Image: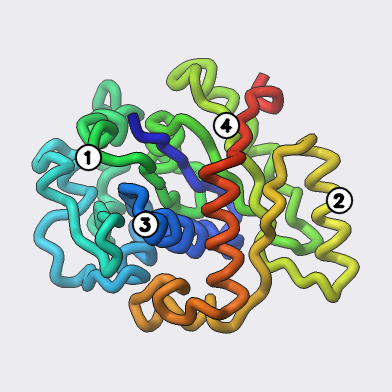
């Protein structure tokens, strides 16, 4: 059975999509059958893996509305072990069209259920909001990975996310836990990055991944070429950090429900 991991934080610009794309790609390079599901109408994960979102005939939107099954939505990536369920701007319509539908929070879970036997990891990239799409991803997931930017207001707003996750755990997904906190945009030259790391470790009590993702120009460049960092510049610090994260994720991924009680 696949490990289904939701990457979420309602704060924008913290590295959710960068992490979804590059963790998925790194798992794929390790020959782990991996599926990346782009749950964001901005579809940056789709384009970040070289898929032209303007030419898609079927996307996650069609799957969530029951117009296509997951198998029909799968797209190849440049990494043989990594497949993608892509998205585009049409996904914005999902929340409006499903607003009054019973079971609307479980549409994604129903869609990807048959994929759990085919893949070892299913990574869900969420929009930067606590929307119905994010609720669907949290309902479908086994665990939540939270990217945390190393900046002054990093921990602000996480309380709201955790409250939402607690409600979903109580009402929709009792098995949901936290897989870990990932420090992103870490600059080891600054006191601020180290202070955020210390605060996160204190608050999350051992759930912070040892691997931190550094500020890296090559990480920012890679999406414009439609490539994950490991294919764009495998020697860069950004690529090496996501490879290390994938190793840690596979071998030592800690799961906790303490914060969700």
How far is the residue under mark 2 from the one under mark 1?
A: 40 Å
Give the label on residue 164, or none.
4
Label 4 CA crowd tier, 10 Å (few <14, some 14–19, many 20+): some
Where in the figure is residue 160, as x and y percent of width and height? 65, 38
Of the numbered discs 2 and 4, the one sitting upstream in the chain is 4
Label 2 CA crowd tier, 10 Å (few <14, some 14–19, many 20+): few
Residue beneath the point at 59% across and 39% down: 253
Report which residue position mark 1 lands on.
Answer: 64
Residue beneath the point at 51% across and 44% down: 250
How far is the residue under mark 3 from the one under mark 1?
A: 25 Å
Labels 2 and 4 touching (C-beta < 8 A): no
Residue beneath the point at 68% across and 48% down: 209
Mark nearest the camera among 2 and 4 is 2
Question: Secondary structure beneath disc 3?
Answer: helix
Report which residue position mark 3 lands on.
Answer: 28
Label 3 CA crowd tier, 10 Å (few <14, some 14–19, many 20+): many
How far is the residue under mark 1 from the one under mark 4?
A: 22 Å
Residue beneath the point at 25% across and 30% down: 113
Labels 2 and 1 touching (C-beta < 8 A): no
How far is the residue under mark 4 from the one under mark 3?
A: 31 Å
Question: Secondary structure beneath disc 4?
Answer: helix
Report which residue position mark 2 lands on.
Answer: 198
Of the numbered discs 2 and 1, the one sitting upstream in the chain is 1
Q: Quadrant of the C terminus?
A: top right
Question: Secondary structure beneath disc 1?
Answer: helix
Q: Quadrant of the N terminus?
A: top left
Whether residue 159 is visible: yes
Q: Is residue 122 above or below residue 164?
A: below
Where in the figure is residue 50, as x and y percent of width and height? 28, 73
User: In this view of the protein, which residue sits in the foreground, 82 or 58?
Assistant: 82
Whether residue 107 is visible: no
How far is the residue under mark 3 from the one under mark 2?
A: 31 Å
């Amino acid at each position: 059975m696949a490990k289904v991991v939701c990457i979420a934080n309602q704060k924008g610009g913290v590295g959710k999509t960068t992490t979804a794309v590059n963790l998925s790609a790194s798992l794929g390079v390790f020959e782990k059958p991996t599926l990346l599901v782009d749950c964001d109408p901005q579809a940056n994960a789709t384009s970040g893996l070289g898929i032209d979102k303007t030419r898609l005939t079927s996307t996650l939107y069609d799957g969530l509305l029951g117009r296509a099954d997951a198998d029909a939505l799968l797209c190849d990536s440049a990494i043989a072990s990594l497949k993608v369920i892509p998205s585009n701007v049409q996904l914005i319509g999902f929340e409006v069209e499903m607003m009054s539908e019973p079971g609307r929070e479980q549409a994604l879970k129903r869609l990807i259920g048959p994929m759990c036997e085919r893949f070892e990891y299913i990574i869900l990239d969420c929009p930067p909001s606590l929307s119905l799409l994010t609720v669907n991803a949290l309902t479908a997931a086994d665990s939540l990975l939270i990217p945390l930017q190393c900046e002054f207001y990093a921990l602000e707003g996480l309380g709201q996310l955790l409250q939402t996750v607690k409600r979903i755990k109580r009402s929709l997904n009792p098995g949901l836990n936290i897989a870990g906190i990932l420090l992103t945009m870490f600059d080891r030259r600054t006191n601020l990055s180290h202070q955020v790391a210390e605060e996160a470790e204190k608050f999350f009590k051992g759930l912070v991944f040892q691997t931190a993702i550094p500020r890296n120009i090559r990480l920012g460049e890679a999406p414009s070429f439609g490539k994950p960092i490991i294919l764009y510049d495998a020697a860069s610090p950004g690529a090496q950090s996501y490879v290390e994260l994938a190793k840690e994720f596979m071998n030592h991924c800690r799961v906790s429900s303490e914060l969700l009680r």
